[in-house]
Image (cartoon, rainbow, N blue to C red):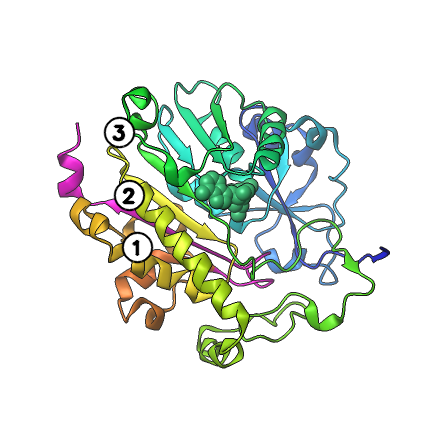
């Protein structure tokens, strides 16, 4: 089927992989020293100032840089060797927020194609004695995961668990005594509707025969047209009307059910103290409502899992938070949620929250 090419419509994000590159060296003497730093991200959107020689150092995520799409980086050898990784800005937030200590035992519950797995490995770093257990239920996708891990030079840190359903993992089994049983940090990035994905790679391929009405949509149901089409939280109410009675609604309920079960299962890990949950969806059904449902489970209450804005680390000053009305009016929970709106926040629409096990419960852990 013929396709049509479309130029990218937001900055290009580049994450430096600490397993294969040295951030300071690249910035001060290497390839990125040839770019001049700027503070205004909006200038890197195509058709604004078109500045291929500028770099924006992200103040929220470590080791993350933005460039104008015209910057000559795609074919750079650093990309081919895995020293740098092209990854959406928002999709770098879960690992950053999980913030595992250098020697931590970590689970990536739904891992393929492996962008967040390799980001976690980069955060642990080359001298880590930690481990990342990467579950992937789909056998074929586990191959892609393996390739991504090898490309990033992370094979010594990552133990891939191909064809394994995270929901069936049992850290309490004796066979997991020195493995899952020791896990303290868990990254959950389960399957979702993908409603926040507006554009990913250099080009977006639109099948020629695809009716235009089936393109990516904003949460109010209107087609995404470009920058500034992102709906505000207030416009969210209208989206309900659009979805009512549609099969999309049933699909969302099924996804949300699965997403809550994934969080609930992670909360059962005996030594877990920190969990991130993320989606590339803009729908509250998969985001704030899932968070509320997870917090209301008996496992969350009995084991002391909570959300608090003070655990957002470097994201504390990020301006876009969860929708209070969708958190049953609970501002503390809403403020613990991070939202990225499509386009305006530098890329795809996204949602992340961090759950922590409260101090009292943590004190009881060995
Ligand atoms: N975190 C990945 C990344 O950044 O590259 C993307 C994950 S993708 C949204 C979700 C993945 O979870 C899919 O590859 C899917 O096959 C896998 N998956 C879905 N249910 C699963 C389960 N119960 N256990 C393990 N993997 C699962």
Q: In the displayed structure, does residue 332 sit left or right of residue 191? A: left
Label 3 beta carbon less than 8 Å to ligand 1: no
Q: For marks 2 and 3, give the CA distance.
A: 13 Å
Seen as rendered, the residue at the extreme right is 2
Please report whichever mark, 3 or 1, sits nearer to the chain's N-terminal start. Answer: 3
Q: Nearer the viewer, residue 24 or 333?
A: 333
Question: Where in the figure is residue 317, as x and y percent of width and height?
Answer: 39, 56
Q: Nearer the viewer, residue 294 or 337?
A: 294
Q: For marks 3 and 1, give the CA distance.
A: 21 Å
User: Image point 62% across, 36% down: which residue?
Assistant: 85
Query: Is residue 319 shown to the viewer in this render?
Result: no
Assess whether mark 1 and mark 2 are in contact (beta carbons under 8 angstroms).
yes
| Quadrant in which the C terminus appears | top left
- Labelled disc at residue 172: 3
Please report whichever mark, 2 or 3, sits nearer to the chain's N-terminal start. Answer: 3
Neighbour tally class for label 1: few under 14, some 14-19, many 20 plus, Cα within 10 Å:
many
| Quadrant in which the N terminus appears | bottom right
Quickly name the residue at label 1: 294
Question: Where in the figure is residue 316, as x and y percent of width and height?
Answer: 36, 53
Q: Residue 200 in magenta? A: no
Query: Is residue 13 shown to the viewer in this render?
Result: yes
Q: Which residues are magenta?
A: 340-366
Q: Nearer the viewer, residue 312 or 203?
A: 203
Relative vertical location of residue 118 with respect to residue 341 in this rendering, above or below:
above
Quickly name the residue at label 2: 267
Q: In the displayed structure, does residue 104 sit left or right of residue 246? A: left
Secondary structure found at label 3:
loop
């Amino acid at each position: 089927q013929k396709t049509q090419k479309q130029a990218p419509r937001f900055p290009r994000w580049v994450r430096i992989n600490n397993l294969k590159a040295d951030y300071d060296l690249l910035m001060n003497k290497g390839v990125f020293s040839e770019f001049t730093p700027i503070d205004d991200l909006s200038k890197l959107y195509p058709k604004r100032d078109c500045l291929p020689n500028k770099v924006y150092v992200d103040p929220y995520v470590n080791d993350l840089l933005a460039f104008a799409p015209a910057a000559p980086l795609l074919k750079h050898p650093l990309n081919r060797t895995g020293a740098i990784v092209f990854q959406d800005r928002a999709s770098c937030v879960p690992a950053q927020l999980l913030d595992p200590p250098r020697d931590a035992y970590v689970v990536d519950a739904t891992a393929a194609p492996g962008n967040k797995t390799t980001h976690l490995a980069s955060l642990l770093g080359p001298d880590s004695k930690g481990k990342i257990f990467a579950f992937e239920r789909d056998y074929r996708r586990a191959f892609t995961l393996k390739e991504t891990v090898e490309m990033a030079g992370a094979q010594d840190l990552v133990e891939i668990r191909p064809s394994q359903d995270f929901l069936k993992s049992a850290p309490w089994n004796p066979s997991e005594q020195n493995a899952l049983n020791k896990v303290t940090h868990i990254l959950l990035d389960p399957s979702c509707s993908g409603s926040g994905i507006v554009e990913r790679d250099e080009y977006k391929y639109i099948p020629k025969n695809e009716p235009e009405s089936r393109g990516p949509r904003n949460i109010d149901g209107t087609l995404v047209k470009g920058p500034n089409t992102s709906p505000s939280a207030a416009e969210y109410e209208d989206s309900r009307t659009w979805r009512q009675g549609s099969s999309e609604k049933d699909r969302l309920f099924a996804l949300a059910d699965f997403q809550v079960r994934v969080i609930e299962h992670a909360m059962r890990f005996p030594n877990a103290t920190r969990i991130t949950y993320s989606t590339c969806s803009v729908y509250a059904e998969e985001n704030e409502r899932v968070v509320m449902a997870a917090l209301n489970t008996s496992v969350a209450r009995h084991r002391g899992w909570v959300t608090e804005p003070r655990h957002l680390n470097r994201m504390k000053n990020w301006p876009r938070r969860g929708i209070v009305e969708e958190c049953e009016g609970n501002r503390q929970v809403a403020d613990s949620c991070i939202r990225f709106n499509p386009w305006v926040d530098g890329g795809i629409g996204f949602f992340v929250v961090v759950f922590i096990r409260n101090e009292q419960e943590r004190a009881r852990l060995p």
